[in-house]
Amino acid sequence: MKPFSFSLEPVLHYRREVERRKQRILGQALKQLAHAEDDLAALREKFEHYADVLRTTYRTLQFQHLHKHYAQMEEVNRRISSSDGAICRCRITVENARMELMRASTERRIIETLKATRLAQHRAREAAAEQNDLDEANMVAYAVERGCFTDGQIGLPTCFSFYAHGGG
């Protein structure tokens, strides 16, 4: 009995490697998204800080300081808007990477399913061949026990000639 060999094993290996690569790309995209969201949270916190300072000290600030606080808030607000755009781009990148990973996983699973099917077929053929060998060995042992063989006889014993001629 020869061992199982899957002719598409190199393709399966390649598909697994592609899937790992897509997983790394998705991981990097998720990391970039998390970083962008952290930056946005920090900017919003900074904006709230400037707004709190302005609310509490509005009456006591001179015009120059008021102008400076409003300019700082405007700059932070502009950066928040820019960060929102960056987050949208990161989310699109993450979604695209997720779709690519799903496609790569599906392609790998198709090859693995084919391998499992072929392995099951191989095992069934091997089991059938083994059963045939056992049946033949049992038939010969039975024939020898019954004395159906004559000296130098080859092929089916005479007591099985009925089966050899299409009988059932």
Image: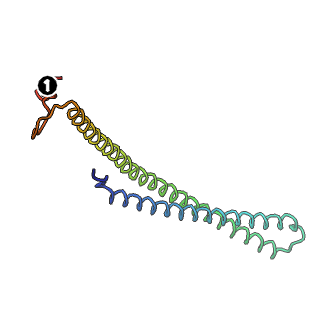
In this rendering, is residue 18 above or below 70?
above
Within-10-Å neighbours for mark 1: few <14, some 14–19, many 20+: few
In the rendered view, does 91 fall on the left or right side of 121? right
- The picture quadrant where one finds residue 60 is bottom right
- The picture quadrant where one finds residue 143 is top left
Q: Nearer the viewer, residue 30 or 42?
A: 30
Q: What is the x, y in percent for residue 127?
A: 31, 41
Q: What is the x, y in percent for residue 90?
A: 55, 61
Quadrant where the C terminus is found in the figure: top left
In the rendered view, does 136 fall on the left or right side of 52? left
Report the residue at 41% width, 58% height from top: 16
Q: What is the x, y in percent for residue 111?
A: 36, 51
Report the residue at 37% width, 60% height from top: 13
In the rendered view, does 56 fall on the left or right side of 38? right
- Determine which residue is flagged by label 1: 162
Q: Amino acid at mark 1?
A: Phe
Report the residue at 23% width, 37% height from top: 136
In this rendering, is residue 145 above or below 124?
above
- The picture quadrant where one finds residue 65 is bottom right
